[in-house]
Image: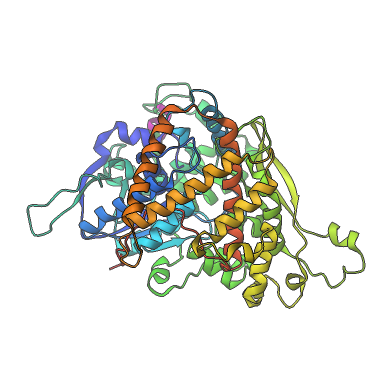
Amino acid sequence: MGVPGLTGFVEEHGGFLAALRVQRTKLVIDGSSLYHRLFFACGADVRHGGDYGPFAAAVGAFFDSLRACGVAPCVVLDGGRDAADGKLATLRSRAAERLRAAHGLSRPGGGGDGGGLLPLLAREAFVQALRRLGVPLAQCFAEADREIAALANRWGCPVLTLDSDFCIFDLRGGYCPLSHFQWQSVCGGGDALGCYIPAKRFSSEKFCSHFGRLNKTLLPLFAVMSGNDYVNLPALEVFFSKARLPGGCCGWKGRKHARIQGLLNWLSRFSEPTEAIENVLQYLKKHQREEIRELLQASMEGYTPSDVNLEDFFQHGNYESQAARKSDLPQWVLDALTKGELSPFISDALILRSTFLHVQVENMQRSSAHSTALPIRQVIYGLLLKISHTTEAASPSKQISKLPVVCEFDRIQKTLKKTFVQAASLPADFCDDHFPLDKLMEVPMSCRLMLLLETLGVKMSILESVPSHLQLPVAVTCYWTRSSEPKVKLHQLKALLLMIIFGELHRTTNDPDPTVLCFEDDSIVYNQFLNEKEKKLQNIEFDLDAAHSFCQWQCCLQMGFYLNQILSSPLPEPDLTRPAIKNKDYTTR
């Protein structure tokens, strides 16, 4: 994320970071940065596809530290891709990196930090943990950076993230890098202000003064010329090859960070961006200049805080976004997206008809684990993109040809490829023109439940004896045993059921809710389970075929989870976090 090399450059020149005591303040948190940081910091198991318990515990401990210091957090998450799909090339590159990381972990002896590869449901587990903690959450319609900057400036508080783009935004309260936010080392203040979290804050004033009093308004041009997630202009290489950058070098092969320092020194000669842009264009061919000028100016706008008022959402539940209005999505969909009740996967399918399927540690010689859940995804696409059937009843072939198509980015062996998937034709109750997507919530709940169960191939009579919070995972498990290829082995099914039981024992023995009954035998069995699990993980070799099978199960659970959400939860949403997290009732005071 952010400007290539800038984080390392700032770290190398420690004077740009000033010590800060974080206490009794609002704090705007980049949710995407936070859940990545917490997952890899908590030592969760990456290879075996989940380990969401330690992750959820780390989320709880983090917000406990904030609460102890009187910090009122607001978490803001990225949404789906924007309508222009400006980051598609970057997203494809990152998906290919995750694929390489997954392949490395799948080989004998693979391990390490996981190469930044998060398990499939980490984001959903994070959102559930925030809800249970009572932490205010907003999911933006597209990328969150500009809305985070606007909210932080409205409140005059810091932004907590690991995205170097926030060195470029003009932030009243500054940018605190997560790498210097010592939330595990809360200090007891010796004065009336009490506890605080030691941190560091990036100072744009110190940063700019280091380069001959560089005007802050030139930082967006620096970011765009350096290349970010949206902009990579090969034509600018001509500039870098011809311009003599003071204190820098001519090309990317020079010493570390030389281009960054040279470009900033060069920009410090100019009083404002327009003057600098005109000087950049002098190095380019005449027929390129106008196009490059427009690209530079448009890209710099990405560093102006958004006009979206997230404060209004946190205080009154209102989210007004021009991009959201232009999307023409039903209001209930927009509301659910903003509250994090629908995944960005849904908005990508709706707006772009294009989705990314995230790789896991699976057998790269087999079909993608996501293949097993394809029929569920087709039903999701059918619900989201359904077309009128009034003229199609007489011609089934014409009906099939008119069904919408979604482009999916998924792996074929060790290569990222795109395939085109046709949406499913829906049952009669959902094909009725009286129930387009904006009226989906008016479909009787019994019909929505029936669609969910028919998609998973399960009858409600089978689920009636199952505790309500486990009905969806059990239904998904039934689907998995029928649909996986190769077929699920009996011992794999037994292992999955044992882990579900283990999760239930964990819930009953650790839940602070006095209404949850816990018997002495539960604790004994739970501790025996825990000991056996630790022994197995230490002594058993990594079974790639078993891992692949459980990856298939998790893909099915993810899509069953999303389908259930779209249908407004005809089955209770299962708890992905397992450890109970007591609600702390955070507010935006």
Q: Is residue 498 left or right of residue 508?
A: right
Residue 299: x and y, percent? 52, 49
- In the figure, 141 relative to 259: above or below? below
The prevailing secondary structure element of the residues shown in magenta is: helix
User: Residue 511 occupies which quadrant of the picture?
Assistant: bottom left
Spot the residue most to the front.
521
The residue segment tinted magenta is 258-263
Residue positioned 59% across, 46% down in the render:
553
Residue 295: x and y, percent? 57, 46
Q: Is residue 56 left or right of residue 181?
A: right
Q: Is residue 190 left or right of residue 207?
A: left
Which of 38/128 is in front? 128
Residue positioned 70% across, 42% down in the render:
418
- In the figure, 298 relative to 492: above or below? below
Colour scheme of the picture: rainbow
Residue positioned 27% across, 39% down in the render:
16
Is 508 contained in the magenta span? no
Q: Is residue 473 left or right of residue 537?
A: right
Does any portion of residue 188 appear in the rendered image? yes
Q: Quarter holding the C terminus? A: bottom left
Which of 230/393 is in front? 393
User: Residue 310 occupies which quadrant of the picture?
Assistant: bottom left
Residue 427: x and y, percent? 76, 67
Which of 123/192 is in front? 123
Residue 409: x and y, percent? 66, 43
Does any portion of residue 272 appear in the rendered image? no
